[in-house]
Amino acid sequence: MQLDINSRIKLNNGVEIPYLGLGTYGISWKKEVDEAIHTAFNIGYRLIDTATAYGNEKEIGKAIKSGSIPREEIFITTKLDNSDHGYQSTFKAFDESLKKLDCDYIDLYLIHWPVRGRDESWKAMEELLGTDKCKAIGVSNYTINHLKELFENSSVKPSLNQIKFNPFVFQNELLNFCKNYEIYVEGYTPITRGKKFKHEGIKELSGKYEKPLHR
Ligand SMILES: NC(=O)c1ccc[n+]([C@@H]2O[C@H](COP(=O)([O-])OP(=O)(O)OC[C@H]3O[C@@H](n4cnc5c(N)ncnc54)[C@H](OP(=O)(O)O)[C@@H]3O)[C@@H](O)[C@H]2O)c1
């Protein structure tokens, strides 16, 4: 299959998500967020991945608003913070994210980490999914056991599991498990934060695809 910046796939609830997205971990100053978002939009990125834990939802909301891409063309993911777990607190955290991002809906809301209170949070997320404020719900950093536990407690499957995934962290068993249950796997740290750029295989691929490894 030909992959490009415009490629999209359908999640298990019919919502379309871009294949490639911009991660925003580690940027929170207005200037750098603006620059990252607008550069990404110009290249063709439409998925912006953030989290309450990144402390940049407000800046991202402003950057999106200041651009010319219509909201419906943009896919926003944000994540429930570890400190916000629980039934009521999930609603509160979600509304705060909406407010900071300054938008009417979030495309994908994820449980950031499988910490205590996650089952109660998931119940709240199921309810959010039934509103027009949230298009899809999912999890992040879930192992097979975490997913099995979630299936026991809920009939609503996550649409997506965001996990560390790259040639050096290739979680094949988890990938196949998710595929069997129609849970889309979204990889983070795809370029190993630059730490594996000296690996012969990576250097070879960089040459083959004419993608320089260093800026
Ligand atoms: N769900 C989770 O728990 C979780 C965990 C981690 C990440 N994520 C998401 O996934 C996104 C991407 O993951 P990531 O940031 O961990 O790792 P990544 O995409 O593998 O690496 C990005 C980092 O690599 C650095 N880098 C080094 N050399 C580079 C080069 N030649 N070209 C481009 N970048 C280079 C960049 O540093 P500079 O900062 O100097 O540009 C950048 O911060 C995050 O932003 C976040 O949205 C989610």
Image (cartoon, helix red, strand yellow):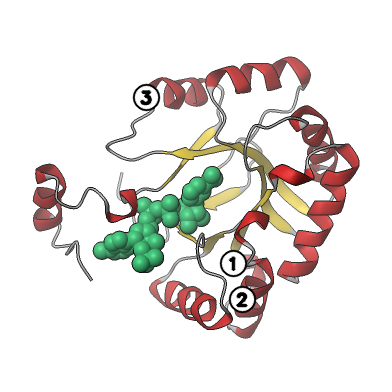
Contact, mark 1 vs mark 3 (Cβ under 8 Å): no
**Location of mark 3 (residue):** 172
Q: Which residue is mark 2?
A: 64
Q: Earlier in the sequence, mark 3 or mark 2?
A: 2
The image quarter in which residue 90 lies: top right
In the image, residue 21 lies at what x, y percent? 47, 58
Q: Which residue is mark 1?
A: 73
Q: CA distance from mark 1 to mark 3?
A: 32 Å
Q: Position of residue 209 (x, y in %)?
A: 15, 57
Q: Quadrant of residue 132?
A: bottom right
Q: Give the amino acid at mark 1.
A: Glu
Query: What is the x, y in percent for residue 46?
Result: 51, 65
Q: Is mark 2 within 8 Å of ligand 1?
A: no
Mark sitting on residue 151: none
**Quarter of the rendered structure image containing ligand 1:** bottom left
Q: Are marks 2 and 1 in contact (CB under 8 Å)?
A: no
Q: Earlier in the sequence, mark 2 or mark 1?
A: 2
Q: Amino acid at mark 2?
A: Ile
